[in-house]
Image (cartoon, grey):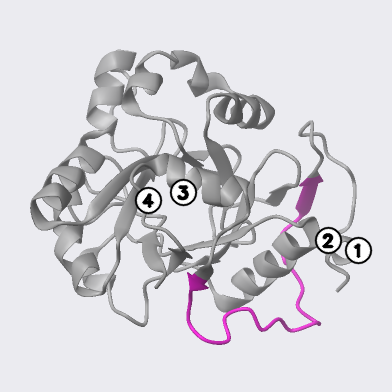
Amino acid sequence: MPYLYETHLHTKESSACGVSWGREYIEKYLDLGYAGIIVTDHFYRGNSAVNRNLSWEKWVNNFCRGYEKAREEGERRGLDVFFGWEETFDGDDYLIYGLDKEWLLEHPELRYWTRLEQFRDVRRNGGCVVQAHPFRQYYYIRNILLSTGCVDAVEAANGGNEPVFDALAWTYAKKLGLPATAGSDIHFTEDIRSDTVFGVYLDRKIKTISGYVDAIRNNTIAGLKIPAGRFNINRNVRVSLPVDIRDDRDRSTGRKLAELLEL
């Protein structure tokens, strides 16, 4: 029987957009049969709730509070809780898995990484990079940046997305031959219902976040928890924002989206 994991979750302690405290998530995910959750609060360049005027050590300690409170409650109640984060560049977001608090404390330079540096260094240290909701079109996003060569996987289904955005992301992941993931992008426990939360199924129960990293890098994800019909794409769909398709050195290629996706 596959094990179900939430891969994209924000807490009030660490994400400025978070509504629920880390500990408040545990009961509801247990009730829905999840084996574990991954806390992915907004990181330094994103919508973080942590004061950037703090020293790096204090910043990291404060940033990790949401995860730590969720983990404490998870240990008490019997739900595995793992650590990750979501970093932002120019409206494009990336989920980072596989590195821990101690590693963060030793690497303050990651605040200034490029996408390429992020990809290389995260992988070099045993982690992975997943582009989150790549086709999302919201008021604060100026363009869609597709990082074709600096990611290990694509978040093809996101609970905060319109279905058309997910359909495009699914098609995109398949064209690139990359694993597809799914996450609820949850901010508020009141939004947790069986028909609204997303997730990833794994064949094995993981003991550490490295188990999830291995599933992505080895392309062994067993399945996705998503609403039926989420990936039904309208072949006439058009993206209203400019699209910037990047190569494996994070350089603009000038390629057209319709050409890439064969729309």
The quadrant in which residue 183 appears is: bottom left
Depth check: give the residue in front, 115 or 209.
Answer: 209
- Say whether disc 2 or disc 4 marks the residue closer to the N-terminus: 4
Question: Residue 169: x, y in percent?
Answer: 66, 65
Mark 4 burial class by Cα count in 10 Å: few <14, some 14-19, many 20+: some
Which numbered marker is on residue 257? 2
Spatial separation of the CA atoms under disc 2 and disc 4 = 36 Å
Residues at discs 1 and 2 in contact (Cβ within 8 Å):
yes
**Which residue occupies 22% across, 42% down?**
66
Residues at discs 4 and 3 in contact (Cβ within 8 Å):
yes
- Say whether disc 4 or disc 1 marks the residue closer to the N-terminus: 4
| Amino acid type indicated by mark 1 | Glu
Q: In this picture, is 191 found above or below 120?
A: below
Depth check: give the residue in front, 182 or 11.
Answer: 182
Numbered disc 3: secondary structure: helix
Q: Which residue is mark 4?
A: 206
Which numbered marker is on residue 259? 1
Spatial separation of the CA atoms under disc 1 and disc 2 = 5 Å
The quadrant in which residue 189 appears is: bottom left
Q: Is residue 133 magenta?
A: no
Q: Is 82 on the left or on the right of 91, as rendered?
A: left
Q: Is 12 on the left or on the right of 179, as rendered?
A: left
Q: Is residue 90 visible?
A: yes
Q: Which residue is mark 3?
A: 212
Spatial separation of the CA atoms under disc 4 and disc 1 = 39 Å
Numbered disc 2: secondary structure: helix
Mark 1 burial class by Cα count in 10 Å: few <14, some 14-19, many 20+: few
Q: In this picture, is 45 found above or below 107?
A: below
| Amino acid type indicated by mark 4 | Ile
**Which residue occupies 37% across, 29% down?**
100
- Say whether disc 3 or disc 2 marks the residue closer to the N-terminus: 3
